[in-house]
Image (spheres, helix red, strand yellow):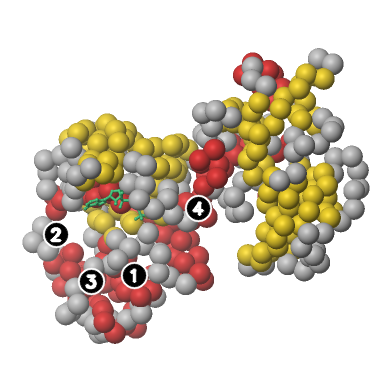
Amino acid sequence: MAHIELDNITKKFNKVTALNNISLEVKDKEFFVLFGPAGAGKTTILKTIAGIEFPNEGLVKIDKEIVNLIEPAKRNVSMVFENYALYPHISVYDNIASPMRSPLYKKDEEFIKKEVYRVASMMKIDHLMDRLPSQLSNGQRQRVALGRCLVREPNVFLMDEPLAHLDAKLRHFMRAELKEMQSSFNTTTIYVTHDYLEALSLGDRIGIINNGAIEQVGTADEVYYTPANEFVARLIGEPEINIFNVDLVNDNGKLKVNMLGQDRLFQLEDEVIGTLAKHDKEIVDLGIRGTNISYSLGKEDDDYIKGIVYSLEPIGNKSVLIVNVNDELIRLIAPNNLQAKLDSEIYIKIDMKNALFFDSEDKTFIIRNNQERLIKGMA
Ligand SMILES: Nc1ncnc2c1ncn2[C@@H]1O[C@H](COP(=O)(O)OP(=O)(O)OP(=O)(O)O)[C@@H](O)[C@H]1O
């Protein structure tokens, strides 16, 4: 059991402010993901909880107890790093057993053997027990490090990109295992990643970190469907969400959108009109994900907007098609076998039901259609 609280934590490394007055609460037994770009401060948050780094300001609390002055070994947290620091001179077996032999957690050898093999078979490394770390692949080493973290049954798991070196298939498998394990261990887990799919699939909640500050905390549906601002919207999803300026125009008493240099107006959903009217700005930013834009080689109806094929890049089993519409580059998804010549004409249709609206100055989220239902998983 562990409930974790960071209260106004600031951490500086000389002139770099790694954490800037961060407050965060992770509930007991929660699988909480920290997600953000390189250098955002994710690892520093984990190290602060583990007690490896000390905040310049603020309090770290585990189960309401202030632990700022408690040494790492007594916090009962277990941290696994991306660069899996294994003991090089002892076997895989002994590496995994090592936390259970430490003076603080000392267990008998019979218990240790059972635990080591339980975890090793889960990690699919039970055939490697006698090897030294130098005789393993990177992915195998990472699984040993993860195994070593798991045998101790701590109150808190802190995991820093533990799957970063695994191949795609193993990574997928391990994600599911980790999630499953966590629910049976009843342990609070804080998991760092910069892979948005991993964040969305693992996290009960996700904290999005940027420049040492928290941009948003929410469930996968909340951060995906109602991102707090344009930064979060851009970070989540592939291809990156399209965001462009649009004019809101009053057309005979009804608010409509003028966009992408078109000489016609586009309808808005009733649900968003009221909020946009109250927002009272003539220019807003419209965000639309590539998955909510369709294309056609001919103009099928008035909603289709003419553009020029700018590029077509395969990403696995599909492609990202970029279309230039009046100098705005719009990214959307197309099948790999699309026969579209560069610079040829193409038509796109934006599904306005899925448009997100942001303030064009401070970039914060204003509204989207259907948001209550989407974040409750009902749509
Ligand atoms: N020991 C240190 N000394 C000096 N600067 C540091 C130290 N540790 C971290 N930093 C700086 O603090 C900031 C946050 O680093 P941190 O490692 O927490 O980011 P991160 O989000 O985990 O990044 P990544 O995804 O690249 O691991 C960065 O600017 C980093 O360079």
Q: Earlier in the sequence, mark 3 or mark 4?
A: 3
Q: CA distance from mark 1 to mark 2?
A: 23 Å
Q: Secondary structure at mark 3?
A: loop
Report the residue at 78% width, 59% height from top: 343
Query: Mark 4 sits on what residue?
Result: 196
Q: Secondary structure at mark 4?
A: helix
Residue 92's place in the image compared with 277, above or below, is below
The answer, for residue 361, to whether it is visible in the render is yes
| Circle 3: residue type | Leu
| Circle 2: residue type | Tyr
Query: Mark 2 sits on what residue?
Result: 105
Report the residue at 52% width, 44% height from top: 220
Q: CA distance from mark 3 to mark 2?
A: 19 Å
Q: Quadrant of the C terminus?
A: top right
Q: CA distance from mark 3 to mark 4?
A: 28 Å
Asked whether the residues under the numbered discs 1 and 2 touch, taking CB atoms below 8 Å apart as contact, a structural biologist would say: no
Q: Earlier in the sequence, mark 4 or mark 2?
A: 2
Query: Mark 1 sits on what residue?
Result: 142
Q: Earlier in the sequence, mark 1 or mark 2?
A: 2
Residue 29's place in the image compared with 276, above or below, is below
Q: CA distance from mark 3 to mark 1?
A: 9 Å
Q: Secondary structure at mark 1?
A: helix
Please provide percent x and percent y for residue 313: 66, 64
Please provide percent x and percent y for residue 311: 70, 60
Query: Mark 3 sits on what residue?
Result: 86
